[in-house]
Amino acid sequence: MSEYDTIKFERSGAIAQITLNRPDAANGMNATMTRELADAAKQCDTDATKVVVITGSGRFFCAGGDLKDFATAPDRGQHVKGVADDLHRAISSFARMNAVLITSVNGTAAGAGFSLAVTGDLVLAAESASFTMAYTRVGLSPDGSASYFLPRLIGVTRAKELMLTNRTLPAQEASQWGLVTEVVADAELADRTAQLADQMAASCAGSNGGVKQLLLGTFKNGLEEQMEHESRLIAQRANSADGREGVDAFLAKRKAEFA
């Protein structure tokens, strides 16, 4: 386990787990946490990592930015910019790495915690989890990629509703809106997360990365451009060792063994 002050970073084979670890501060993000999160994300952006799990310690997933930390800074704006920039570096790495990001939302996800939670490629939420933007309540505006992902996940109208009214979504409603992949009983969340992580660790990292790459570009590309990306990428996959193994295993009616 790598040594950090505000997160736990553990590896088990091809699976890395990051636990936001400031339970006494509701896992609020301060400058140290976002800096460490960006560093951990960089460590995960390797061929050796096929799955990254993010969860929180204690009752909260993450209550967002640590306002007490912000208030002590001589220049609040400059301080918050640095915190946001480090968080954004982490999210960019998670979004573009081949590894599948599973966010295991064990409790309240507010502000930047909400933003981080829904960046997961697969989002598991405990039944007791809840989601709220909360930014405008304290005179701030969204960060952590919320203005990018939320409109794409739920549409602009619902994104505005969450951001302007600070409505709280229970886990089941967040699932109905398309923000959560699966809602799990609180006592079963850790086991279900481990099961899903093992499933993804046995899959093809290059193919998973290709899915992520294609979907990141789908809303900015025209039809023909997107199809050209698809044809080039599937050709690369067909020539790769994992692509050959997958096809050969299917034809031989055996289970594929990906690198």
Image (cartoon, rainbow, N blue to C red):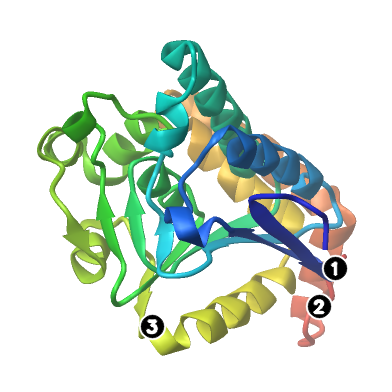
Cβ atoms under marks 1 and 3 closer than 8 Å: no
Quarter location, residue 64: top left
Residue designated by label 2: 249
Q: Amino acid at mark 2?
A: Ala
Cβ atoms under marks 2 and 1 closer than 8 Å: yes
Residue 186 circle label: 3
Residue designated by label 1: 245
Helix or strand or loop: what does disc 1 sit on? helix
Q: Quadrant of the N terminus?
A: bottom right
Q: Amino acid at mark 3?
A: Asp
Any part of residue 165 in sight: yes
Work out how far the residue at label 3 is from the one at label 2, CA to CA, in angstroms: 38 Å
Q: Residues within 10 Å of mark 2 (few under 14, many from 20)?
A: some
Q: Image check: 67 left or right of 22?
A: left
Helix or strand or loop: what does disc 3 sit on? helix
Q: Image check: 135 left or right of 218?
A: left
Q: Amino acid at mark 1?
A: Glu
Q: Quadrant of the C terminus?
A: bottom right
- The residue that appears at 62% across and 44% down in the rendered structure is 94
Work out how far the residue at label 2 is from the one at label 1, CA to CA, in angstroms: 6 Å
Mark toward the start of the polypeptide (1 vs 3):
3
